[in-house]
Image (tube, grey):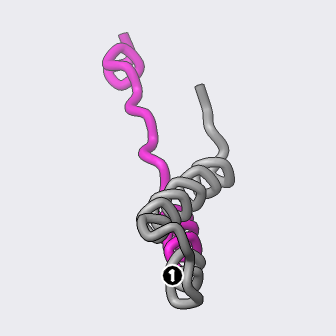
Amino acid sequence: MKISPYWKAVAAGVVAGAGTLSTALADDTISAAEGWAAGLAVLAALGFTWAVPNKQPEEPASTITGV
């Protein structure tokens, strides 16, 4: 299955934001600093995931040797 690089980055951003916000909600409130931290975590996850290319699939051995 081929997953678009856009969706890979979006999923990483959602996971980073949810993880940061779940930690911030430990005291039942979200302060401004915690909100900024969650936003920066989402942006960092989007940026780092976008920057790393997907691994190219290897060709089968029969294709490489010409058999």
Query: Does the segment drawn in magenta span residue 24?
Result: no
Residue 47: x percent and y percent?
Answer: 55, 73
Q: Residue at x 68, y 54 (%)?
A: 6
Q: Nearer the viewer, residue 33 or 59?
A: 33
Residue 7: x percent and y percent?
Answer: 66, 48
The mark tally for this picture is 1
Q: Nearer the viewer, residue 9 or 4?
A: 9
Q: Is residue 12 left or right of residue 26?
A: right
Q: Quadrant of the C terminus?
A: top left
Q: Residue at x 51, y 81 (%)?
A: 34
Q: Amino acid at mark 1?
A: Glu
Picture quadrant where residue 64 is located: top left
Question: Residue reaching furthest top?
Answer: 67
Under circle 1, the secondary element is: helix
Q: Nearer the viewer, residue 38 or 67?
A: 38
Query: Does the segment drawn in magenta span residue 51?
Result: yes
Residue 40: x percent and y percent?
Answer: 54, 81
Q: Which residues are magenta?
A: 40-67
Q: Residues within 10 Å of mark 1 (few under 14, many from 20)?
A: some
Q: Residue at x 57, y 67 (%)?
A: 46
Q: Residue at x 43, y 34 (%)?
A: 57
Q: Is residue 1 left or right of residue 26?
A: right
Q: Quadrant of the N terminus?
A: top right
In the image, is residue 26 above or below residue 5? below
Magenta-highlighted stretch: main secondary structure? helix
Q: Which residue is mark 1?
A: 34
In the image, is residue 8 above or below residue 19? above
Picture quadrant where residue 52 is located: bottom left
Residue 65: x percent and y percent?
Answer: 32, 20
